[in-house]
């Protein structure tokens, strides 16, 4: 499968290309749901979830909305997630996670790990989560939309330590691979689990054993050739080419971070920062100023960076992913923020 070797995942793993991160999370969590049903002696893809207990799901506060959307699609429910957070940023409370798993008294559950959360690019402690899921018999699903690419560089691979011990992993090709929308990756340790959910039968279709089809491993039966663009970029740049790209982008992110008030560390390629003029304190006025800077920057058009809320404070979160991004580009971000901020203050 395209991408499996790139990320260093075991050869026995399987998976499918999807429409993006949400589709990939649907696939990975569908495999988890089927596995969970099997632990209860049920085929949930035939019988549904009726008469079974609620599916226990654990995550940190980093869990992405595409994961909760996937759980809703699968009938597990958005409200099934127990968020084990130790601070306002959402970092994982390992002790709370372990207590939750212990309280299940051996019953199966699903744990969702985040490899690169969206505001600051932080990672859950995946190796420690794998220790717990192995100890308590839970399924570990890792959402690695862009963070899985940290595997490619020795400078960042420590962030994904333990990833090969997960049961399902996702990534986005239209992020760091720079291929067009839409393209996601879903990798599953036991690919046979996908067939139970996504296989379909009709007299005019070839059976799965007669003619392998990726349409029987994911939600889409009609599929475009996403693999072609993925193959082309991997053929052109290879592991070393993408390693160099990632290392350059990490360096650019840290260069940008040196110029502004960071609200979090910069482990990978996202810089969470805000504009804070001398003498202005935390509070509603500073939040309003930064929110307005984000609006004016879009109208200005020279640069674009997303506005977010981090730890209760309004902030910006440029994510450096494009192969053309240069040092001059990230310096322009800092310049535009300061210029607009000063102009708004003066006005």
Image (tube, helix red, strand yellow):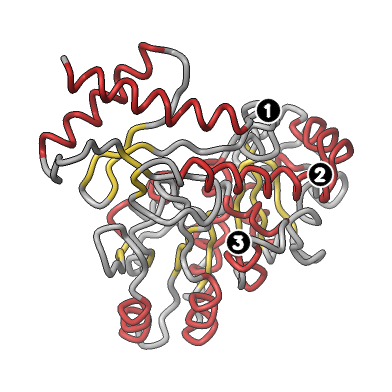
Q: Is residue 103 left or right of residue 40?
A: left
**Left of 84 or right of it: where is 236?**
right
Q: Residue at x 55, y 52 (%)?
A: 268
Discs 1, 3 touching: Cβ within 8 Å: no
Residue 108 image offset from top left, x and y in percent? 45, 76
Give the distance between the C-alpha atoms of the residues marked 2 and 3, in whole angstroms: 26 Å
Q: Nearer the viewer, residue 313 or 58?
A: 313
Q: Is residue 159 above or below residue 198?
A: below
The residue labelled by disc 2 is 241
Residue 13 in the image, given as x and y percentages of width and height: 75, 62
Q: For the residue carrying disc 3, how many other residues have a C-alpha within 10 Å: few (<14), some (14-19), or many (20+)? A: many
| SS label for mark 3 | strand
Residue at x 38%, y 17% (from the top left corner): 298
Viewer-side residue, 75 vs 286: 286
| Placement of 304 over or under 98, stated as above or below | above
Q: Quadrant of residue 195?
A: bottom right
Q: Which of pointers 2 and 3 indicates the residue nearer the eye?
A: 2
Could you say which is closer to the camera, residue 143 or residue 338? 338
Horizontal and vertical percent position of residue 143: 53, 54
Q: Earlier in the sequence, mark 1 or mark 3?
A: 3
Pick whichever of labels 1 and 2 is earlier in the sequence. Answer: 2
- Point out which mark residue 168 bears: 3
Dot 2 falls on a residue whose secondary structure is helix
* Label 1 Cα crowd, 10 Å radius (few <14 / some 14-19 / many 20+): few
**First-in-chain label (2 vs 3):** 3
Residue at 62 percent across and 68 percent down: it is 158
Q: Which mark is residue 324?
A: 1
Residue at 36% from the left image edge and 27% from the top image edge: 337
Viewport quadrant of the C terminus: top left
């Amino acid at each position: 499968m395209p991408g499996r070797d790139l990320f260093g995942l075991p050869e026995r793993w399987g998976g499918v290309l999807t429409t993006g991160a949400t589709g990939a999370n649907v696939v990975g969590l569908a495999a988890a749901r089927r596995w969970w049903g099997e632990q209860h002696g049920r085929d949930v893809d035939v019988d549904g979830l009726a008469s079974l207990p609620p599916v226990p799901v654990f995550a940190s506060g980093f869990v992405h909305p595409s994961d909760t959307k996937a759980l809703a699609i699968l009938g597990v429910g958005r409200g099934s997630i127990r968020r084990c957070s130790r601070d306002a940023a959402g970092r994982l409370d390992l002790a709370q996670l372990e207590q939750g798993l212990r309280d299940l008294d051996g019953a199966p559950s699903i744990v969702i790990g985040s490899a690169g959360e969206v505001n600051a690019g932080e990672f859950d402690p995946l190796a420690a989560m794998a220790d717990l899921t192995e100890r308590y018999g839970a399924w570990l699903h890792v959402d690695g939309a862009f963070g899985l690419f940290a595997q490619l560089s020795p400078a960042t691979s420590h962030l994904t330590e333990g990833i090969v011990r997960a049961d399902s992993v996702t990534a986005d090709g239209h992020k760091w691979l720079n291929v067009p929308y839409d393209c996601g990756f879903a990798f599953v340790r036991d690919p046979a689990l996908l067939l139970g959910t996504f296989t379909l039968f009709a007299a005019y279709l070839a059976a799965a054993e007669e003619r392998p089809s990726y349409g029987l491993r994911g939600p889409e039966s009609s599929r475009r050739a996403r693999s072609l663009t993925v193959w082309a970029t991997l053929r052109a740049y290879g592991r070393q080419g993408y390693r160099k790209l990632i290392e350059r982008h990490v360096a650019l992110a840290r260069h940008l971070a040196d110029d502004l008030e960071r609200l979090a560390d910069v482990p990978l390629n996202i810089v969470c920062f805000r504009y804070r003029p001398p003498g202005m304190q935390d509070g509603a006025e500073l939040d309003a100023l930064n929110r307005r800077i984000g609006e004016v920057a879009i109208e200005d058009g020279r640069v674009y960076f997303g506005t977010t809320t981090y730890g209760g404070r309004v902030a910006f979160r440029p994510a450096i992913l494009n192969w053309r991004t240069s040092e001059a580009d990230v310096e322009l971000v800092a310049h535009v923020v300061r210029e607009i901020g000063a102009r708004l203050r003066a006005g």
